[in-house]
Image (cartoon, rainbow, N blue to C red):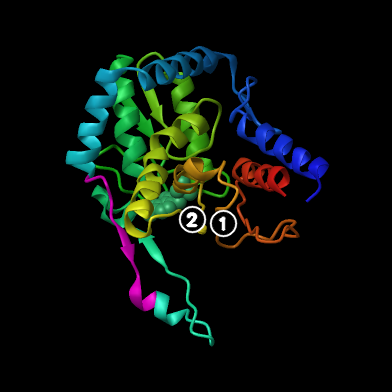
Amino acid sequence: MTRESALQAEERENKWMNFQRPDSFDRFGKFGGKYVQETLMHALTELESASRSLAEDEEFQKELDGILRDYVGRESPLYFAERLTEHYKCPNGERPHIYLKRKDLDHTGAHKINNAVAQALLAKRLGKKRIIAETGARQTFGAEVRAVHSGTATLKDATSEAIRDWLTNVESTHYILGSVAGPHPYPMMVRDFHAVIGKETRKQAMEKWGGKPDVLVACVGGGSNAMGLFHEFVNDADVQLIGVEAAASFPDSSNEGFCCISQNKWVRTIMQERMNNIT
Ligand SMILES: Cc1ncc(COP(=O)(O)O)c(C=O)c1O
């Protein structure tokens, strides 16, 4: 590598390392921002400043850490999948060492609880007495369930309907949005509440094999577990990030070593931008 190209590579790397996600306009590349009715702007601004100040609030963090440990059951194990590793053995005997981050062992059987308890705590701090949430899985803990028949009657429509309810009851209600979707600050906030997944993974990898993972693979619905896992490693150019979503088409997968089939455009943008900046 010539000195000039080394400098260019370093400049690209620095640019990437210093790139704020989201940027000062609350955007992730060309996605993000707040495109909602004026009535919701105050609630979103209030939510953003609460989430930023609670991130620095030791008492809040201590309470949240305690709940994550004693109620959710964190940290979740990083399990060596011996037989899966054996199954993918190459003819030359080499094999990928496959580990599973056991989010199925989080209380309720999924990572979603990290964000749910954190936002519920935040709602308490905001003095909100009513909670609404969208669900595609119907794990509702005794909540009143309202069926959504509009549009394609899927999670996306449930989310729109929840926002409609929030518009009407914004004074009393907090909307716990369950993935990295919706207007700012939700994508940032939900990602940050799940960032514990990536932090644990880095620590566990160091304990187990004294290094980093080479490849991280996460399923993408809305993108919250993927972002929770990837966020910690986004600046590690030597860690490949792979987001997998069912029934989507492959976008421009021309980048070698990069596969992202997420339909969530901002998750895709983040991974795409990362590739552009490190290649
Ligand atoms: C167990 C489980 N994993 C993953 C997902 C995908 O969601 P996300 O992409 O927000 O992590 C869901 C969504 O409902 C889920 O229930």
Amino acid type, label 1: Ile
| Above or below: residue 266 compared with residue 40 | below
Q: Does the residue labelled 2 lie within 8 Å of ligand 1?
A: yes
Which residue: 65% across, 61% down? 257
Taking the image as drawn, is residue 129 in sight?
no
> Are the residues flagged by discs 2 and 1 in contact, CB closer than 8 Å?
yes
- Residue 241 within the segment the image draws in magenta: no
The residue nearer to you, when weighing 159 against 165, is 159
Mark 1 lies on residue: 242
Tell me if residue 234 comes above or below residue 192 in the rendering. below
Residue 218 image label = 2
Instruction: Single out the residue that lies furthest toward the front.
Output: 3
- Say left or right for 223 vs 260: left
Q: Which residue lies furthest to the bottom in this view?
A: 91
Is 209 drawn above or below residue 2 in the view shown? below
**Residue 147 location, x and y as percent?**
41, 44
Q: How crowded is mark 2: few (under 14 residues within 10 Å), some or many (20 or more)?
A: some
Q: Which of marks 2 and 1 is nearer the N terminus?
A: 2
The magenta stretch spans residue 74: yes
Residue 22 visible at all: yes
Of the residues shown, which amino acid type is indicated by label 2?
Answer: Ala
Residue 144 image label: none
Locate residue 188 relative to residue 201 in the image: left or right: right
Residue nearest the viewer, comparing 221 with 132: 221
- Residue 134 spot, x, y in % from top left: 42, 39
- Asked which secondary structure carries label 1, the reply is strand
Q: Tell me the SS state at disc 2.
A: strand
Q: Viewed as shown, does residue 242 lie left or right of 76? A: right
Q: What stretch is highlighted in magenta?
A: 73-84
